[in-house]
Image: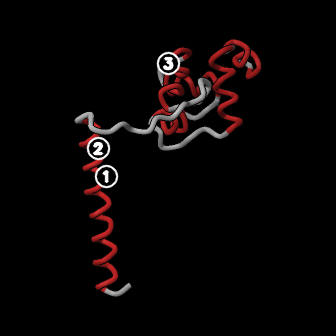
Amino acid sequence: MTRSTQQDASSRVGDDLVEAFQEMAAYLRGEVEAESYELPDDLITPERVKAIRRKVAASTKEFEQQFRISARTMESYEQGRRRPDAAMQALLRVIDREPDAVRRALGS
């Protein structure tokens, strides 16, 4: 990339940021409405992962001991750094609804 091309790209990024902040300010002043999205009730969000873990264990380490999902993995899900794949989402739903069944199945 040439110096001129880099400056043009930087300028466009800066312009996009300024526009985004102007839109956000207009929304906060009540001048425009933001798009809203319907999320499925069963969506596994970071907050939901944390709620499931707290429901059955006091810490991620305790959760790891009971359900054999590493504390580090749970922390990543809870902080939104990673998203559980379909199999993990299914397991978390089962843990949420029937934690004792999972404990029995794992022999904990």
**Quick one: 15 or 90, which is closer to the camera?**
15
Q: Give x and y (percent) for residue 65.
A: 59, 25
Can you tell which of label 1 and label 3 is closer to the viewer? Answer: 1
Which residue is at the far right? Answer: 105
**Residue 24, numbered circle:** 2
Q: Residues within 10 Å of mark 1 (few under 14, many from 20)?
A: few
Label 1 vs 3, first from the N-terminus: 1
State whether residue 103 is above or below residue 71: above
Label 3 vs 2, first from the N-terminus: 2
In the rendered view, does 18 fall on the left or right side of 1? left
Q: Give x and y (percent) for residue 42.
A: 62, 25
**Residue 20, numbered circle:** 1
Q: Are marks 1 and 2 in contact (CB under 8 Å)?
A: yes
Q: CA distance from mark 3 to mark 2?
A: 34 Å
Can you tell which of label 3 and label 2 is closer to the viewer? Answer: 2
State whether residue 58 is above or below residue 9: above
**Residue at image location 53% in from the left, 22% down from the top:** 53
Q: CA distance from mark 1 to mark 2?
A: 6 Å
Q: Give x and y (percent) for residue 48.
A: 52, 25
**Quick one: 71 or 39, which is closer to the camera?**
39
What is the quadrant of the C terminus in the image? top right
**Mark 3 lies on residue:** 54
What amino acid does circle 3 point to? Arg
Residue 27 occupies quadrant:
top left
What amino acid does circle 1 point to? Ala
What amino acid does circle 2 point to? Met
